[in-house]
Amino acid sequence: MSLNDVRRDWTKLGTEDPLWAVLVEPGKRGGRWDVDEFLTTGRTDVEDTVEWLRRNDLPTRWERALDFGCGAGRLSQALAVHADHVVGVDIAPSMIETARRLDRTGGRIEFVLNEAPDLSRFPDGHFDLVYSALVLQHLPRPAVDRYLAEFLRVLRPGGIAVVGLPTRPTRTLRGLIWRFAPFGLISWAQRRLLDYPAPMRMTPVPDAEMTRLVAAHGGEIVDRRPDLPYTKDWQCTRYALRRR
């Protein structure tokens, strides 16, 4: 799978059922997410993370924040409470269109289509915060590694990245399928048996590899904690990273 495949699939997901594609929940498929309820989940996520950062004596107010893989703007709008300016980037034009349509912040968020395999449109040290949740796992592993390096590059020294990632599948039936079945088969099942508009890849990054990648690109892991996955089939971790 390439980034072109990711763009194609998520453009289709964003066209047909954007809120469900961002946050897969039982009973929400087919446009059944209430917009207010959907946005509330973003506020809950961000407020919980802000409290976690505060306990680690990390900044909780930012001049410029980047929401990577912003989708429909669920987290971007919540981050706008804590930042002077928020930039939400996404690879899918349909998601950017939905995010702009749902934006209730009065223009405090800049939603940007970013189809590049990097964040080269932003200079070094441009952001105080990079936030990415429920995003990187949908990319092929080389892209995950590249974007993690970019997160640290675009942070100012001392800036913070909050990154949520699956670290391994669990031992549920679906978790074992993810562990052993080729993605081509999983993709077929998602489309033919589960009737997904397009497949969703899951790419884990083991904790040891995350530690190595962060250190290699001038960062450090300040704290890590179990993250709440949207499925019991994955063990997920949320990281607070700091650029040295």
Image (cartoon, rainbow, N blue to C red):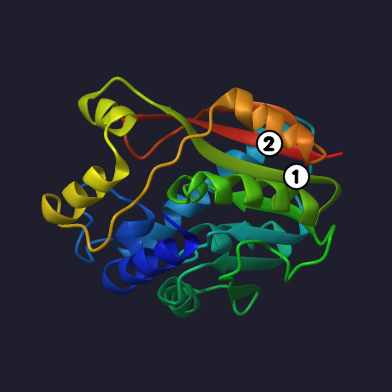
Q: Residue visible at 71% across and 51% down?
A: 151
Of the pair 48 and 28, the residue shown nearer to us: 28
Left or right of 194, for residue 95: right
Classify the position of the N terminus by image quarter. Answer: bottom left
In what element is the residue under mark 1?
strand
Residue that badge 1 annotates: 160
Q: How crowded is mark 2: few (under 14 residues within 10 Å), some or many (20 or more)?
A: many
**SS at mark 2 in the image:** strand
Residue 36 in the image, given as x and y percentages of width and height? 38, 63
Say which residue appears at 66% left-offset and 61% top-offset: 118
Residue at image x 52%, y 74%?
104
In the rendered image, which quarter contains the C terminus? top right
Q: Quadrant of residue 164?
A: top right
Q: Is label 1 in contact with label 2 (beta carbons under 8 Å)?
A: yes
Residue topped by disc 2: 240
The amino acid type, in three-letter code, at marker 2 is Ala
Report the residue that reaches farthest toward the top.
171
